[in-house]
Image: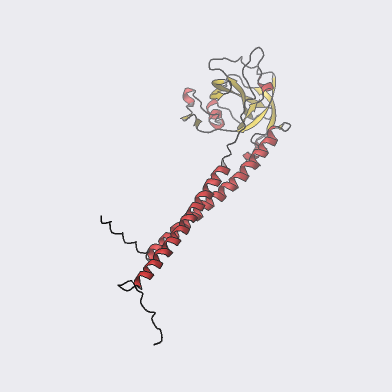
Amino acid sequence: MNSLPEAAPRRPHGPLATAVLAVAFAFGFLLFLSLGLWQVQRLHWKHDLIARVDARVHAAPVPAPDAAAWAASSPVNHEYRRVRVSGHWLPGLDTRTQALTEAGSGHWLLRPLRRDDGSVVLVNLGFVPEHWQPVPPDADAPAEVTGLLRLGEPGGGFLRRNQPEQERWYSRDVEAIAAHRGLAGALPYFIDADAASAVQAGSPWPRGGLTVVRFRDNHLGYALTWFALALLVAFGAWRFALEERRIRRHWRQRSTEQPDGSTHPGRGRAR
């Protein structure tokens, strides 16, 4: 039985094709390597952030920043800091925003507090069930709140945008809530009240102290993935170079062979 003829080996790539492939391998390797290094930088940044936030959450409360102190610093220097604020509640201006917590599905109850300097800060008193109705606050009674300073959440949440005209709030958008309620002098942050500050006599609601301080930290896995891809590209380039070398050696050897299988005598040899 006759065997099929052996397929002729491919010829080596030309100089242009070899150069293009070399550039592609180099580009891929440098791209994946740079992405891996970037994730390592993000890893260090995230761990530093977690350490700073953890220190703030467990520190003694400090006075909440006023407008001047806020303008003179970066917002990230205040986020998740334990603060205390005092003043008087502004009744009739509560805002409920959608919430999903360990206590179930319901709302966050945000209430404005007028400080002694005339500024207003929104206080998230905590989680309340869907149809629970709070007792109106006494506008003349002094109030003091301790909690975590939080940055506003503009736009919306739960894949939906806030609809102030319909009183549908899906995020704690401080700027939008202040504008809708006509709160002149509102500060650009809100305070998540702790459990003690949120307690309302005779009711388990609002339930404060439910702030979830958790940061996703997948940077190490991402970095290892990018570095692995960079190594795969480098391995592919090495294998390509070996294969090209083998093919070129084969064609050089083939070009020196006589039709009968012998090789040509060396050129330039003295007779």
Across and down, in percent, residue 100 comes to 54, 24
Q: Is residue 200 left or right of residue 239?
A: right
At 43% from the left and 59% from the top, the residue drawn is 240
In the depicted view, which residue is nearer to us: 16 or 138? 16
Residue farthest toward the bottom in the current orientation of the protein: 271
Q: Is residue 174 left or right of residue 161?
A: right
Across and down, in percent, residue 154 comes to 53, 33
Residue 187 visible (yes or no): no
In the depicted view, which residue is nearer to us: 212 or 117? 212
At 41% from the left and 67% from the top, the residue drawn is 249
Across and down, in percent, residue 262 comes to 35, 74
Q: Give the quadrant of the N terminus.
A: bottom left
What is the quadrant of residue 185 in the picture?
A: top right
Residue 57 visible (yes or no): yes
Across and down, in percent, residue 36 comes to 55, 49
Q: Give the quadrant of the C terminus.
A: bottom left
At 63% from the left and 29% from the top, the residue drawn is 191
Q: Does 82 sit above or below residue 105? A: below
Q: Is residue 163 left or right of residue 203?
A: left
Residue farthest toward the right in the current orientation of the protein: 60
In the depicted view, which residue is nearer to us: 13 or 68? 13
In the depicted view, which residue is nearer to us: 6 or 157? 6
